[in-house]
Amino acid sequence: MTGLSTLGFGGGAIGNLYTEVTEEQAYEAVTAAWQRGVRYFDSAPHYGLGLSERRIGAALREHPRDRYTLSTKVGRRLEPAAGTGDDLAHGFAVPATHRRVWDFTADGVRRTLEGSLTRLGVDRVDIVYLHDPDDHAEEALRDGYPALERLRAEGVVGAIGVGMNQSALLTRFVRDTDIDVVLCAGRYTLLDQAALTDLLPAALARGVSVVIGGPFNSGLLADPRPTATYDYAPAPAELLDRALRMRALAERHQVSLRAVALAFCAAHPAVASVLVGARSAAEVHDCADQFATPVPAAVWQELRTTGLLAPDAPVPAPEPS
């Protein structure tokens, strides 16, 4: 699909993922992304119980609505909660003012989207994803997907898709429905190429765009160290060792592991955009710098010969000499 910048802004971090991000920091992160040419912004009600949507909407309000692509998600409906405490059990450092209710019904999809439009301060979004229907596949296929189809036909949304941390069910949606785009988080990275054998070929065959989320596998590929996380949990020793070997290899060729990780995700012909979750302007600028850094062909060759990268995984074309 058109309209997606090759580097996108993922809104989870500015929803106070794990730790607090101030209003000023969140605004500066979104503004820095705009300054660096990012025109695709993704959020979800799940991220900070709506905080991410409010912050992205506020920061983008000064820009013409037709100049950027905005996506959000349905499947977790927010309901007011009377209790106290925080939302850290779900990963977000925000007050537990609401609770999440899994809801892929047609009514739930519409109500959830209405709430998102209010928080974002817009009258339409460009993409709506069914969010993490792993344990609700049949309801999402039976009720949620047809509801999104109707919203698309009515012109309420421009494109529809599914966003998940696995490739198998995404592949089923690609093959069995008429979605426009999928958001695949963490399953096509330097450390995990599960999507290479099912989702990406299916998406190419069906003309479905792929957005890659989690290009650093939640941190390990950004900064491999003993305390790093992999898919939001402590990194297993085997994967930490693999990431450290990759970093040493990259640095021998005067590039960062972050640059290699981002370039790899973007190289597959099915991939339209790579989402990075930044919590500050500095992180945004670093990601943009790394994304623009050419990776020497020798890096890809050595990754393959050392067995650190699948031989059939596409890599960027060599830079013209």
Image (cartoon, helix red, strand yellow):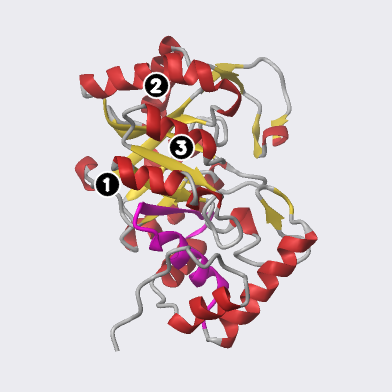
Q: State the residue at coordinates (33%, 47%).
A: 204
Identity, as a three-letter code, of the amino acid under mark 1: Tyr
Q: CA distance from mark 1 to mark 2?
A: 25 Å
Check the picture and name the quadrant holding the N terminus.
top left
Closer to the camera, 100 or 166? 166
Q: Which residue carries the number 1 mark?
A: 68
Identity, as a three-letter code, of the amino acid under mark 2: Tyr
- Label whose residue precedes the other's in the sequence (3 or 2): 2
Q: Residues within 10 Å of mark 1 (few under 14, many from 20)?
A: some
Picture layout, residue 117 above or below residue 40: above
- Label whose residue precedes the other's in the sequence (1 or 3): 1
Residue 166 quadrant: top right
Picture layout, residue 97 above or below residue 200: above
Q: Which residue carries the number 2 mark?
A: 145
Residue 119 spot, x, y in % from top left: 41, 29
Residue 71 quadrant: top left
Q: CA distance from mark 1 to mark 3?
A: 27 Å
Where are the magenta residues, as a range? 255-282
- Label whose residue precedes the other's in the sequence (1 or 2): 1
Say which element carries label 3: helix
Closer to the camera, 225 or 54? 225
Q: Which residue carries the number 3 mark?
A: 171
Q: State the residue at coordinates (56%, 63%).
A: 190
Say which element carries label 2: helix
Say which element carries label 1: loop
Identity, as a three-letter code, of the amino acid under mark 3: Thr
Residue 201 spot, x, y in % from top left: 40, 48
Q: From the viewer's perspective, tell me whether residue 124 is left or right of residue 94.
A: left
Q: Are marks 1 and 2 in contact (CB under 8 Å)?
A: no
Residue 154 spot, x, y in % from top left: 22, 19
